Image (cartoon, rainbow, N blue to C red):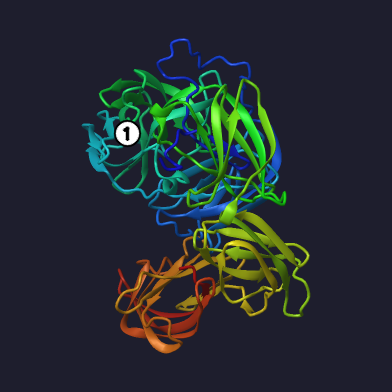
Amino acid sequence: MTLFRILTVTLCFSLLMLSLNSCQKGFSDENYQPDSHPNDTIVDYISRSRASVQGFVFDENNLPVAGVQVWADNNSTTTDQYGFYQFNNVLLPTSGSAIRVSRTGYYNASRAFSLTDNGFVEVKLMKRTVTGTISAATGGSVTTADGARVELPAQGVVIAATGVAYTGTVAVSAKWINPSADPGSMAAMPGDARGLNKDNKLRFTSSLGMLVVELHGDAGQLLQIASGKEATITIPITSSLQSRAPATVSLWSLDEMNGFWKEEMAATKTGNNYVGKVSHFSFWEAATGLPVVMLRARIVNGSSQPLVNTPVIVTPTGVPWMAGYGRFGYTDAAGYINAVVPASSNLILDVATRCATSLYSIPVTTTTADVDLGDIQGNLGQGAVTLQGTVVNCANNPVTDGYIQFYDGGFNHRIPIYNGSFSFSGTACVNTTTSYVVVDRATFRQSEPQTITLSGQHNLGTLSACAVSSIATLTYEIDGFNYTASEPSLQPAGYLLAPTSSDWTQILVHGISPDRDFSFQFNGGTAIGSAHYITEVFCKGFAGERAIATVPLSVNITEYGNVGGFISGSFSGTMLDFVTNVPYTVSCSFRVRRNN
């Protein structure tokens, strides 16, 4: 049995509270009372505390997502070219909040976290595709390849923004989320396993399956179920749970704002599925609500240094019929985990790497009282990584405001530089090769991209943040109208597409001004010089949002760095609007960071 073939328990790690499905007793235990517990907590939505949180946003291919807006409660920021976001010392609900990300073509993401001084939350987006269509007038149903089903009533859909009845064709996007998914899918799991029952008491939601649904109209507008109407959803039960799944469970919807699941409806087991009615669409899960306790610990290495952003797995033991469910979460910047787990349970706590390799394990038993394990230390073997060194600027003085960015090989970390020094202790997959750059925020300079193979302790010596400018810029003119932006206000992303026979490079730049994103692609590979051309440019500055070059325009490339470096160049010429055929005089100069 692999490490991740385990029963799910939720880890509310510092800032990333992970859902791990679990159960205190078997579902068939008639004496089990899931709604009574001496530590019952009624959640306070009003109180606010200051906290910091950071992390990364990835797409379904584990590539960083640049230029998307990220929210924590009412605070917002934008991911940079590495998919990195950060909230520093912001007011958040003391009971816990959620990192929320919205991107066109993807389901909304909402990952819950508890408050610590400096936490870490990674978010993985789930691609949204249309499952099928239904007539709003007559109603109907669609079914996913996994067997999940959505049935809409006749004349039961409205435009979400206005509440006005919608009568056209409904595009239904639905996705079943397997609670026993592999580790690569776990960062996409919504919320965490914290739920609020109908009495507003904190519960652990032991999930038997999730379903996300979005409805869109003919013009792409978001739709919802009409007031007074209900839709029917079918959530498949995984094969390992079918014989033990209870006859009825609650249906819980996700409150995306705070990441809590909310008990609302009921579902009945019908064959190998749970079937129930819902009054709105969101993320839904069929789950049992279990009493909880808090599990706290600090994970350290053999030198008592805290392990930062390190995966930790909690596995309940003694319930083999639910084997196959796993989640992992990350320690915060001080090495702490704060985990919401089921009460009165036997658990195994694994300290792991991001490739799901367990480095060491310890047994844990919960009762009805919170548990503080103090410092946890064990033999990390080859999975232990320590990085340290010093950084100077162009004047050979210590860098006082900067960072080292590691950005590939599954080792995504941003290590701060304090008073010219840096130190990091964590875990990595054995012999991971990763790239990094060293950035000085004060002088806007950085190193060239470097690579390192991680294994054990590394003293990187004295690094220099001086080789090139760290500022990305883009300026373009369309018939005399000039748009200019540069970092930090601009968050650009330049990236190399999957190689084709012509080695096309696509430049995509976000944040010029509202609705002014700018993109184009040029051929000719990575060569310096003018042996490149473009044929079209996409920008809402054109009437048709796209312009075509009747004769390919030459692009002069002056810089083409490795991943983490920069691509620079310029072009100019006449282009025709794709819709109106009106000619435009277009010019552009750019310097964007390459992130793939």
Q: Is residue 245 visible?
A: yes
**422 w.r.t. 319: above or below:** below
Residue 312's quadrant in the figure?
top right
**429 w.r.t. 97: above or below:** below
Residue 377's quadrant in the figure?
top right
Where residue 272 appears, as percent x and y from the top left, is: 27, 27
Q: Secondary structure at mark 1?
A: strand
How many residues crowd mark 1 within 10 Å: few (<14), some (14–19), many (20+)? Answer: many
**167 w.r.t. 248: above or below:** below
The residue shown at (30%, 29%) is 234
Query: Position of 222 compared to 515: left or right?
Result: left
**357 w.r.t. 487: above or below:** above
User: From the image, which quarter does the C terminus lie in?
Assistant: bottom left
Nearer-the-camera pick, 432 or 204: 432
Q: Is residue 590 visible?
A: no
Residue at label 1? 157
Nearer-the-camera pick, 429 or 332: 429
Nearer-the-camera pick, 458 or 336: 458
The residue shown at (45%, 78%) is 479
Where residue 210 appears, as percent x and y from the top left, is: 39, 34
Where residue 1 appears, as percent x and y from the top left, is: 40, 40
Query: Position of 568 compared to 234: left or right?
Result: right
Total numbered circles: 1
Where residue 594 appears, as percent x and y from the top left, is: 49, 71
- In the orientation shown, which residue stands out farthest toward the top? 31
Q: Amino acid at mark 1?
A: Val
The residue shown at (72%, 49%) is 304
